[in-house]
Amino acid sequence: MMDEQPRLMHSHGVGMAGHPGLAQHMQDGTAGTDGEGRKQDIGDILQQIMTITDQSLDEAQARKHALNCHRMKPALFNVLCEIKEKTVLSIRGAQEEEPPDPQLMRLDNMLLAEGVAGPEKGGGSAAAAAAAAATGGIGADNSVEHTDYRAKLSQIRQIYHTELEKYEQACNEFTTHVMNLLREQSRTRPISPKEIERMVSIIHRKFSSIQMQLKQSTCEAVMILRSRFLDARRKRRNFNKQATEILNEYFYSHLSNPYPSEEAKEELAKKCSITVSQVSNWFGNKRIRYKKNIGKFQEEANMYAARTAVSATSVSAHGSQANSPSTPNSAGSAGSFNMSNSGDLFMSVQSLNGDSYQGGQVGANIQSQVGASPSSVNESRHTVGMACDTAQPLSSPGVQTPGIT
DNA sequence: CGCGATGATTCGCG
DNA sequence: CGCGAATCATCGCG
């Protein structure tokens, strides 16, 4: 890339040096017409040109100026033009329009996705911190990690941007420098605008390849950060007890249809200080694990049933439902999600005696419901456990709970 | 350390 | 895209 230009110049040099004949030639060719003076003159000039790079800068500058003003300059310039015309074609041929680098695109996209590139969201980490504070102590642990992640990310981002800016600035400086150089050189050698354009693009390409290295390492840094922090999803923390209780409460009170809507998920997420997708994960895991071994969950099922029953009775202790198993949930569906009915609470309550096997179950629920006092909860739970044990053979090991898809 | 619990991820399906 | 299912990876307890 960059070496194209040196090669260009070099090839000229070689062209001249490689044809020691040129100087000789001219000397010989002009022999006899104007005498030794002129021959010597040309020889001197060529000599000066060939050795100009060996001289000190000031000296070379002076010599250059002298040459520029030399009367032979136009002639030499023409010679160079001719040479150029021949070489420039081959150079042109070698020059290709570069396609946009897919690798670079990939990196760019990733940086954009990670929020490293793209518009500065200055208040980002602050907002995250505020959010963390707003969620209260419950999610503090998680949120702290998150803000930590954000902080590191923004650090990377800052470094990335300053470096990028530096590179861009250097690139511009270098470009203008080279263009000035070329402009100046164009007085002594033919330089087409096309050529300048080419040089600029070469420079840009070079710098963009440097930028790509920057982007590459930035990506790597982000990946590492990710694996250390965000991938703490792998290095998971259990949800705190309160969150688990909220989730379980919902699950068991919607046992007949434990599929929270998007809104419900959002609300649960808010209540538990976790994300919606975590809620989804939780319900996904819960459903499958519950279904896989209902017996194992019976105890907690009835516990939550009892709990909701307690709240239900305390809230609506009005007469009507003294003995009807008002825990709609577990009673109605102890073994299976979506029974034929739509599974909303009262529906399943009504239909509870309609289907399937849980005669003992109902009794158990009634017990647990009756046993509202904390002291008796244990007992009721126990009996429930027994009941579920008897029910278990029906539904647990082989699993296929009736009515589940 | 082993083992079950549990949150997260992946894959295939409709 | 949401779900079920299988699987991974870590946690927490004895």
Image: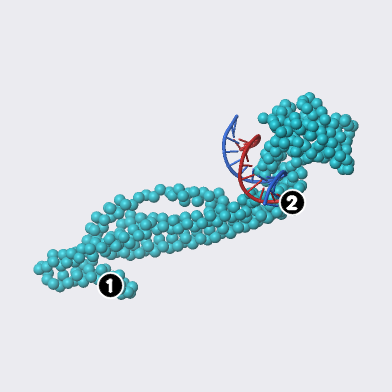
Chain colours: A cyan, B blue, C red
Residue A287 in view, yes or no: no
| Chain identifier of the residue bearing label 2 in the image | A
Name the outermost residue toward the left: A32
Q: Where is residue A151 in the image (x, y as percent from the top left)?
A: 62, 57
Give residue A121's quadrant in the image: bottom right
Q: Residues within 10 Å of mark 1 (few under 14, many from 20)?
A: some
Q: Is disc 1 placed on a helix, strand or loop?
A: helix
Residue for point 65% across, 53% down = A146
Q: Is disc 2 placed on a helix, strand or loop?
A: loop
| Chain identifier of the residue bearing label 1 in the image | A
Direction from residue A174 to residue A85 in the image, left or right: left
Residue for point 45% across, 58% down = A210
The quadrant of the image that shows the C terminus of chain A is top right
Tally the numbered discs: 2
Q: Distance between the residues labelled 1 and 2?
A: 80 Å
The quadrant of the image that shows the N terminus of chain A is bottom left
Q: Nearer the viewer, residue A66 or A378?
A: A378
Q: Nearer the viewer, residue A123 or A146?
A: A146
> Could you say which disc has been placed on residue A214 in the image?
none
- Three-letter code for the amino acid on which mark 2 is drawn: Ile
- Residue contact between numbered discs 1 and 2, judged by CB atoms under 8 Å: no
- Three-letter code for the amino acid on which mark 1 is drawn: Arg
* A263 shown above or below A178: above
Circle 1 sits on which residue? A63
* A9 shown above or below A107: below
Q: Where is residue A284 in the image (x, y as percent from the top left)?
A: 67, 39
Circle 2 sits on which residue? A138
